[in-house]
Amino acid sequence: MSISKLLVANRGEIAARVLRTARVKGIKTAVLRHPSEVDSPAHLIADEVVTIDGPTPVAAYLDIAQIVDVAQRIGADAVHPGYGFLSENAAFVAALEEAGVTFVGPTSEVIDLMGDKIRARAFVEERGFPVAPSAIEDDDPATFVERARAVGYPLLIKPSAGGGGKGMRVVREDSTLETEIETARREGERYFGDGRLFVECYIERPRHIEVQVMGDGQGNVVHFWERECSIQRRFQKIIEETPSPALSEAQRLDICETAAGIARAVNYRGAGTVEFIYAQDGSFYFLEMNTRLQVEHPVTEMVTGFDLVAEQLRIAAGEGLSAAQADIPQNGHSIELRICAEDATADFRPAIGDILLLDEPRGEGVRVDSGILDGGKVTTDFDPMLSKLIVHGRDRAEAIARARRAAQDYVILGVTTNLAYLDAILDHPKFRSGDVSTGFLAEEATDLTQDWDPANTDILAAATVLSDARLVKALENVPEIYRLMGSWRN
Amino acid sequence: MSISKLLVANRGEIAARVLRTARVKGIKTAVLRHPSEVDSPAHLIADEVVTIDGPTPVAAYLDIAQIVDVAQRIGADAVHPGYGFLSENAAFVAALEEAGVTFVGPTSEVIDLMGDKIRARAFVEERGFPVAPSAIEDDDPATFVERARAVGYPLLIKPSAGGGGKGMRVVREDSTLETEIETARREGERYFGDGRLFVECYIERPRHIEVQVMGDGQGNVVHFWERECSIQRRFQKIIEETPSPALSEAQRLDICETAAGIARAVNYRGAGTVEFIYAQDGSFYFLEMNTRLQVEHPVTEMVTGFDLVAEQLRIAAGEGLSAAQADIPQNGHSIELRICAEDATADFRPAIGDILLLDEPRGEGVRVDSGILDGGKVTTDFDPMLSKLIVHGRDRAEAIARARRAAQDYVILGVTTNLAYLDAILDHPKFRSGDVSTGFLAEEATDLTQDWDPANTDILAAATVLSDARLVKALENVPEIYRLMGSWRN
Amino acid sequence: MRRILEVDGEDVPVWLASTREGHVLHMGEREIPCSLEQAAGKGAYTLELSETRIPMRIAVSESATFIHFNGRAYEIGRTDPAEALDKAGSGASRDQMLAPMPGVVVSVSVAPGDAVKEGDALLVIESMKLETTLKAPRDGLVAEVPFAAGDSFGGKDVLLRLEPQEETE
Amino acid sequence: MRRILEVDGEDVPVWLASTREGHVLHMGEREIPCSLEQAAGKGAYTLELSETRIPMRIAVSESATFIHFNGRAYEIGRTDPAEALDKAGSGASRDQMLAPMPGVVVSVSVAPGDAVKEGDALLVIESMKLETTLKAPRDGLVAEVPFAAGDSFGGKDVLLRLEPQEETE
């Protein structure tokens, strides 16, 4: 069941990244494109670019029937979904199966199970893996307060129907539990028309740590070590690294083995990530499992030397894993920066524009997975992530130094990016010492905005007027007599 | 004695590569430029670009007085020589010393010793390291034949004054030794006006294997494992790799320890390379020591994770080595391809031209150390090496696959390069199995030139005429009536 | 040759002059000799300013200049005051006229309540040594003239407001 | 619209025609429908030829076209026969006239020993359906005319040789 032609049902940097590995493996490739999309690196790599229609570009990439049809029409025997879009869509997997096309990923049953956060959590808990203590009112309303008390303090009350932090209340003392429950219920009714609640253990200054796993679907599962992803804005990661600076060797083995155990429990096939919330006291709890490749997978590739997409393709072709656990090292340190078109000084508002000049950093230990080309255009049709800058160093300090150099050398002109913001994070003393949590960016927001250096105003003003061809041309046409007057102003 | 400003007394890809590391270390940088040089990546990286004069560009880079003057004038406290040019020039080192500028490299004494091949060989032999058996007529003309006989067969007779293979004779049997010596003597007289000879052990199908060493000048020396450099054309390496596919683990340790021992014997400071000739029977002999960074150093960086330039700068600043021998791993496999502007189908004749389109490969395990920019020009002023493509893989097969993909994706249009030739070498069964020697390219020359695929003629002809704007424009102006005639030809 | 730059959110009026020695940038009362040379690479330049040489990358769009130097990218808004003044009449809406940059009112020809016809001269302003006459963008009644002759105004201040137009139909 | 291409060391005369359905490349007796579309990235195109779509990168210089496809770069020499024929008289030296491409001799006006003046018509050739009159590049004596009317010649063949000129001075 070897793969001879692969359709990548995705776009941007991840499509380019998957296509490159397929080419190394000698597999023919195809990728999708919506007519409104500008040129991107993936279009240059794929043997074939297939146009798909849709009322919006995103709708096209979510159109299961159309994409399955493309796969059949072009004779692709496998589809790689990338991340996002249909990568965790069980219906897509089922449709491909019916069409006789291999899905590069887990079975639809596993996607279904892990896609349902409540079921996934119950499954993991039943098998003895750590989940954060919690109490769901619906399970037995009569005993809810009692069960909430058993969760321990501090705890967090959330509306069952809620989202976005609305109606959430932290309770630190037993004496206020019942009144806070009543307040939260009223707020839930007011905001969501639904007063049902649940309670979970509140973790102060948590870290987000996840573990890369890979299974062959035949019972063999290995992990590729952890990634620390605590640097988040708007609940989205923007800097990831491995190893996590938080973990001792014993904790590292513990969390990685736990993740592999969870994947083993579902007889996992393909690449997946088990996400944990990690408390300051070293305890960690299962959050969820992502049944696909993650955006941040390259940091794992940098320290292990493995090509995770190559492993995915091996497994999809029925060739199994290429390595046993003992063969998977964790060498040096790797950091990923997500370069986004956004204004970090204005609440991360997405930016648009033309890419007037692009020059990517290069050199030892530097990898750029990019979704843009020089002369391209950044629109709001898709996610604002333009590119990923991944560096490797012998240790964390070297990785940080290389990341800063590369971020500073990354020239993207014509659209606002978060490069300076990412560089400021890398330079923050707390980041340098590894003392971060998921609240880091919010807590340190003021430290992360640089003061304006007044000397820059002169430099920028001079460069702007001197590079203004029309202005300089006009000046050259000024009669010599005026120029000789020295300070010509009119 | 920390370095605050570094002058890179070099150009091209190595200047860019050194400058990048200096920037990561927070050192201010400057680089040289001759007025005739086209823009190159180094000029974009350096904080300062200093113009140097000279009757030819090469002469400028060899002008010791001028370069020492530049270093003083711009306040550089250290000079990195790169490779070539003044990198192994003891007079340059002495001049810098006198000017109070740190030379990033060994002492002038060591450069002197190793620069004299005869003295270096004698030094190494005296200390008990292996050198190829040989006999020099001048040492004692009366016993020359006897000493030649003691070298063993096959042996090689060379004119002492010779070069370029002229007058060299292989002797395989003792019965012909004396007549061959007489013939060689006559040929030496004829070609060089000098009949003196020397004899050395002739190694059949030798490999060129070298070892990267690094010393702190305080007696500490470590090695960074070996590199196999047998793929040579015109005695110049074009593909290098590490580990060498020839060595067993025991041999690897043996050759690496021998190299470190030689470096220790001269109390070596900085980065150096000990080159060996390696025979099919596993024996190896000291050839020479290069007292500088080599072109092919990146393959060592890829498998060890060390930045060799950073180590050089540490040592020059008196901070010593950053690691002990046990901390230097050899992870995975790395291959370097030297991309040269030359016609591999016409005896590697250097090519010139304008770089009309440049697109470098990227992705996992791919590093490009380039000396050219899009829109640049390739002249004959310097070496034809444009760029180096370095790949890393978990094993040799993966490294080869990645190297091939990257070589095929490397787009350089406007000047002839050896990319297709390099790709053909990577695809050769003997290269794949690691069964090579320094004669490989000559022996397999016919297998390395691809047959012309007649289908390409149609494709190339069609693309050429359809991309000929003047032609297509003219065609569009043909009156409709003619176009309707179907096959319009006049 | 004047420009109004927007640097770090502030309007910075500048002009560039040419002397025997080269270009001089005038910012406020300061005169800064400067020059810009092309350097290696796409969009690469070296700026020489007060004896320092600063390597940079520059890309220019219709209304902004993007500059990467010292490891960061900046966007500088760029307005030609001559063009901006001409467009003053076509401010935020057809009801109000906005100042494109700071300046001084030279004279005012109308008062609140006056009926004006499209194209009538309403007031004369001076910014950066350029006088411009603002003309009525449509027929209408003057509602407000916030500044008198001699008054200074800031960038984006309302210079004149017309009564809102009745929706006809 | 004709061109002479140099592909893999061989001269390949081609012409491109346009039909209702699109472009047709004529090579020898073959007619190959083809089209070229711009694609993603600098110099990127997709060639459609005999139902196959081939992605490529193309860069064009004065006299050659550089094409990267299927992992390799090729250089294709490009000559416009109309221009090339005009230049036939300015061949390798002022003593001999080289054929810029294969063709047929239509007529010969001179014989060895004839004295000619610069600009005199010497012979008429036809290549790729274009007739061109070759004229004397300088005053001199005809030394050799290797081909007669009706003869075919190859690219770079010598069509006419003048006696070497005496060094004057």
Image (cartoon, coloured by chain):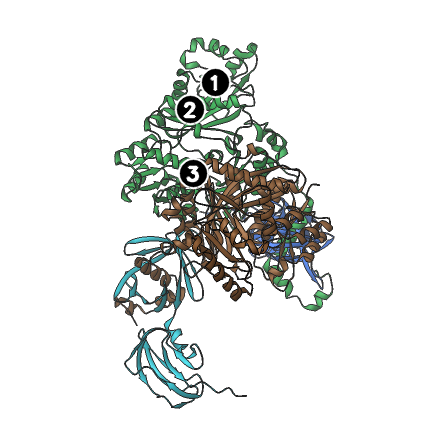
Chain colours: A brown, B green, C cyan, D blue
Residue type at the position of mark 3: Asp
Q: Chain of mark 1?
A: B
Who's the residue at 49% across and 10% down the image? B150
Who's the residue at 65% across and 61% down the image? A53
Q: Are marks 1 and 3 in contact (CB under 8 Å)?
A: no
In the rendered image, residue B88, in percent from the top left (x then y), is placed at: 37, 31
Asked if one can make out residue C135 in the rendered structure from this viewpoint, the answer is: no
Q: Is residue B18 left or right of residue B148?
A: left
- Quadrant location of the C terminus of chain C? bottom right
Q: Is residue B477 left or right of residue B417?
A: right
In the rendered image, residue C76, in percent from the top left (x then y), is placed at: 39, 63
Q: Which residue is mark 1?
A: B132
Asked if one can make out residue B132 in the rendered structure from this viewpoint, the answer is: yes
Mark 3, secondary structure of its residue: loop
Q: Chain of mark 2?
A: B
Q: CA distance from mark 1 to mark 2?
A: 19 Å
Q: Which residue is mark 2?
A: B260
